[in-house]
Amino acid sequence: MKLSATRVRALKDPGRYSDGEGLHLFISKIGRKSWVQRITVDGRRRDIGLGGYPKVSLAQARKRTADNREAIGNGRDPVADKRKPSTPTFREAAHVVHEANKPRWRNGSHARAWIQTLERHAFPKIGNKPIDTISRTDVLTVLTPIWSSRPETARRVRQRMRTIFRWAMANELIETNPAGEAIDGALPSMPKVKAHLRALPYQEVASALHIVDASQTSPASKYCLKFLVLTASRSGEARGATWDEIDLEDASWTIPGSRMKAGMEHRVPLIDQAIDVLMLARQLEDGSGLCFPSPLRPGRMLSDMTLTNILRKSGLADRATVHGFRTSFKTWTMEQTDTPWAVGEAALAHQLGGSVEQAYARSDLFDRRRALMQQWADYIAA
């Protein structure tokens, strides 16, 4: 049934409403109305946006539909005619979105991985296509080969593609998101499984450190890994530690919020064994201010793979990850100590409770954490 001006004005429910001759009124989930014409050029079915309603009326949309049909009859491609020379390719749009988001990503490795996954999986297939020509079928050609074999990678690729297409929609380059929910029916369901990082039983942490000490790896990486274990810190926090963050007189390490996952400054108690490691690391100073500078790249911090490579060379990688040592520590606190939950969480720099609870619980439990970390170090040494 053909649409009427009154019905177009009254329609509210999201969906696609046909007017015939390939013309459709599309209503988004947020109520935005736009005109889309489905056409076939060179045997390929495509959608072409005709503008938003009410800026483009029903009569105007019908006129544009007729013009496009006439163009096709004369051997022209109305999509190519409509496209502006400035319309970016998918690759160009991805780099624009990547650069726009980089300032809010504290983790440099995440920023690199964001674009690298697209370079590996999406760019070879759709990178050079103008973004307004990419269809759901194109998106499926990217996702289908990895959807079942590499599900986590596929999720990330799709999420990043959706972000890029949302940017294109906001800039009125496309009308709909080809990586959106409409392709769900063509992809097998994927169970939501949370993969836990491998972690050694806490009883084996001491022997693991002995194996690492005996390995043929650089002193900087060995010291950094041991310091990470003794302080229950994250890889990036330990690798990026600088001497101006260390207060040997107070026996504390203050990590600025810019280097913390939660974005808040965190003070770490330095127990005897951690200070011993720092004294050994003093011999490695190269003028960069880093506690554990890279032996391969003078003046720069150890790479994010350095500590993982230690575990590989030590034969531990199939049973443990660097981050997993935090799990070993947490399990030890629960099974071998009577440490209150809040103290254990604070030692891991986890946020406690909701915003109201945090507003009242302002103590960082520093002294109690110092006692706990000394217990942990003594346990490892024993």
Image (cartoon, helix red, strand yellow):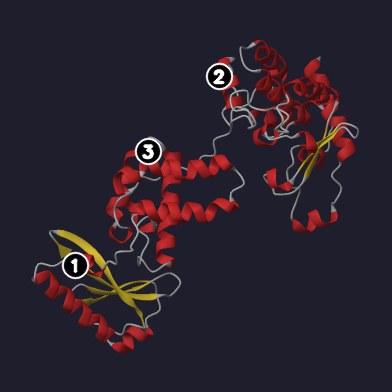
Q: CA distance from mark 1 to mark 2?
A: 56 Å
Q: Residue furthest top?
A: 214
The residue indicated by pointer 3 is: 148
- Work out whether mark 1 precedes mark 3 in sequence or the reverse, and give the earlier one: 1
Residue 34 as seen in the image, left or right of residue 21: right
Identify residue type, mark 3.
Ser
Q: Residue at x 59, y 28 (%)?
A: 297
* Residue 179 place in picture, x, y as percent: 37, 55
| Residue topped by disc 1 | 39
Mark 3 crowd level (few <14, some 14–19, many ≥20, 10 Å Cα): some
Q: Nearer the viewer, mark 3 or mark 2?
A: 2
Q: Is residue 314 left or right of residue 16?
A: right
| Viewer-proximal residue among 49 and 363 | 49
Measure the alpha-carbon separation of dots 1 and 3.
33 Å
**Quadrant holding the N terminus:** bottom left
The extreme left residue here reads 74
Classify mark 3: helix, strand or loop.
Answer: loop
Q: Looking at this view, is 364 or 12 the one in front?
A: 364
Closest to the camera, between mark 1 and mark 3, is 1
Q: Amino acid at mark 1?
A: Ile
Q: Percent from the top left, x then y, of residue 42?
A: 12, 59
Q: Which residue is mark 2?
A: 312
Q: Quadrant of residue 59?
A: bottom left
- Point out the tag, 3 or 2, that comes first from the N-terminus: 3
Q: Amino acid at mark 2?
A: Arg
Residue 96 screen position, x and y as percent: 45, 55
